[in-house]
Image (cartoon, rainbow, N blue to C red):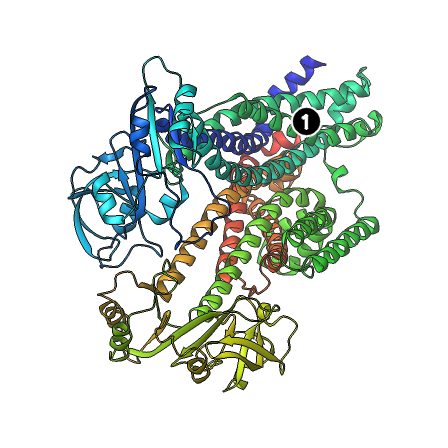
Amino acid sequence: MLRTTLAGLRLHKARLVTTALAIALGVMFVSGTLVFGDTLEEGFSTKVMGSADDFAAVAVPAADEDAPAGPEEPAPSLPADALEKVRDLPEVDAADGMTLGDAPLLDKDGRSVGSLPTIGMGLGDGTRFQPAEGDLPEGSGEVALATTSADATGYGLGDTVTVLDSEGDRHEFTVSGLVDFGVDRAFSYRGVVAFDEDTAREMTGAEGYSEIDATAAEGVTDAEVVGAVEDAVGPGADVETGADHGARLAESSGADVQVLTVGLMLFALISVFVAAIVIYNTFAILVAQRQREMALLRCVGSARGQVFRSVLTEALVVGLVASALGVVAGVAAGWAGFAFGGEALGADTSQPLVVGVLPVVVGMAVGTVMALGAALLPAWRATRVPPLAALRTSATAQGLDKGIGWVRITIGAVLFLISGGIVFVATNVGVGATGMVLTTVAGLVCFVGVVVLSPLLVRAVVAAVSPLMRRIGVASMLAADNSRRSPKRAATAMIALTVGATLITGYAVVNASLKTTMDEMLAEQFPADYLVSAPMDEPEAVVPQSAVDALKGSDATGTVIEQRQAYTGSDEATGDLPVTTYVGGTLGEDLKNDAVSGSLADMGPGKVAVSEGYAGDREVGDTLPVATENGEKEYEIAAVLEDGGTLWGANLVPQDFEKAFPSIEGSSELLVKGADGASAQQLRDAVYDAVADAPMVGVSSMAEVKAQFDDMLNIAFLAIAAMLGLAIIIAVFGIANTMALSVLERTRESAMLRALGLARGQLRRMLSIEAVVLCLIGAGVGILLGIVFGWAAGTTAMSSMVFTLPVAQIAVFIAVAVAAGLLASVLPGRKAAGASITGALASE
């Protein structure tokens, strides 16, 4: 029986090529993801530990969990004499220290880079950070920049940069080198300007050290050095070996790698699921076509178990071979992903490719189990048909189209109702993980319902368009008749495409809705062309009055709204309360916020608009006590506002605020709108000229912020669409495979049509139209499901989501579906048209 099975595989190998490709693609994604994740994690570890491992001991200030957090709080440091104490230890061969402070780097426009000051770092030759390009600074005229700072500003080796010292004075330096500071989030976010140690202290005013790195004397172990350093620096330091320090940093960065790997694995599982559908369809059709062959084997003595095992053996051989190819392709994909994406993620791309046992074992297991699992039901069905009954029928897949009736309709309807009920619950439980999980479950239940009802969907859709198809021509008419005659076969071909279309459409809906929602939120929270803000690291800082006067006097600016704010104590219900007013702007007109109750239009003297979180149990008409500079005063609540909007805390009209807090004159923020007729460049020049003498004042453009969000969302959409596109490719293989098998099944029928006068071109068009119709039905069902579940997913993720239908992207999906159908029909159509008429008619 084994020889018979292997002979059958050799005879019918062409039928299984696309099945093997589907398995290989699914396995490639799984193995490639694991290889990419392992290599990326090793690249992080190499980057972090490559320098830390060189030191016997690393000492850092002990973390104080009770210390207040915030940029205005000084970072803990080791005493200034700690380094000399470590250098004097007999166990230590050499030691060097690192100092940290604030040293704002100015960009080429003369503005401070980022919303928080750049980190000023003092580096010695013996610290664990070494330049990726150029050299570490030598003397007071040189600095080294973090690679992230260089990327953000466009500065390079040899450029002159301006840095502010602790007093705000400007100093110019030459860039001597670029340093890659690895995975430390503070260094990545804020950026770094590195000086020699003496210059760093002069620029930042820092005292002491943020880190001391020591190497061991000859014959001394790392553990002995750690113990000696601990005794020297005292209890205010955490001391560990360089290897342990590097491993801890690598482990913290590895968590991000694990999240990325898990996310990629979810897309891999989607591809595997679609591939499993393709494999099941292939074996179901193959077994149905070979009923006579299997019946003959039964008649000559083969037992049911032998026939069952023969089908599984075919699946096992195909699964093993395709899985092996998929693992090889996965290793190549993992290498490509790391080579092109590793640097963007901050890993050391010189790291060799890591190919462990797990990617190989998992890839082989996934592909083989997928093939065997998909072949189980067709193999069992092959043993249920009586041999004589099978011999009396032609080798067709008629068995695929039995059982389309009320039972199927009932089961499908029940599944749809269950899915709808779950969606209703998911969209009403509020934003959070529970709703998202329920939406996923609802989607799975609904998809099972689609699988159950798919033959009926095919029959109904084809019946609806048949009158039009009959008018187009003979080929179109025959295509409609073929699809209606075998709706189950047609449905099995379209299901895989339906999965891919659902996922991509759903994500497109979420992406478009999120973009629209973010645009509206930005428009509400940033109701101006420019936002000018005082330095974030100085809680008492205000925008200089000279900048305010310059903006108000410029012809390019139309409206300048000043935000003034005070923090004050209130009663137990509200706690510390931010009190804000807007000079030059009207609440409800220039500044808006959705209200839970009341209206901003009712604001006036003696009244307050308070956000819901600070209102407590109070309602409109109640009074809100506020501790002012002149004692506690009560204001009538005119509106209770939704949390998270532009207006938060307590909002007063300017005259009430001035009476309550007469000492506050400066503005923490300015909202600047352009004048009618002023160009974008004129407004930008006016804003930047006004704050030219205050480099630490932040300037944000509404257009730039929106563009950043749009860029991030577009990049995310393209990346995810590319990953889901693999599922579409596998689905196209499935349709091509189904079409090829149906051509083989209908060889005699095609020959008869040719004999009756159907031209070769008409036969090819018939098969092309069949494939296009199937792809359009599959894509159409997937698009509808994607819209519904995209809306549900977005609603559970963001309560204020504005639903947006991405019409252009959906149109692209439909065009892709048509192209996929045409592509899937090319080879089967050519094979059918090229077959000999007399040979096909005489074959049965």
Q: Quadrant of residue 386?
A: top right
Q: Quadrant of residue 50?
A: top left
Expressed as whole percent of the image width and height from the top left, the position of residue 431 reads 62, 58
Please, what secondary structure does the residue beneath circle 1 have? helix
Expressed as whole percent of the image width and height from the top left, the position of residue 283 reads 68, 31
- Say few, some or many: other residues with alpha carbon within 10 Å of mark 1 (under 14 / 14 to 19 / 20 or more): many
Q: Quadrant of the C terminus?
A: top right
Expressed as whole percent of the image width and height from the top left, the position of residue 694 reads 25, 64
Q: Quadrant of residue 2?
A: top right
Q: Is residue 433 above or below residue 355?
A: below
Looking at this view, is 409 or 42 the one in front? Answer: 42
Which residue is label 1 attached to?
Answer: 372
Q: Is residue 140 above or below residue 612?
A: above
Looking at this view, is 374 or 698 the one in front? Answer: 698
* Residue 357 visible (yes or no): yes
In screen coordinates, is 415 left or right of 174?
right
* Residue 395 visible (yes or no): no
Q: Quadrant of the N terminus?
A: top right
In screen coordinates, is 526 left or right of 399?
left
Write the residue at 64% across / 78% down: 619
Looking at this view, is 737 or 685 the one in front? Answer: 685
Expressed as whole percent of the image width and height from the top left, the position of residue 129 reads 31, 33
Amino acid type of disc 1? Answer: Leu
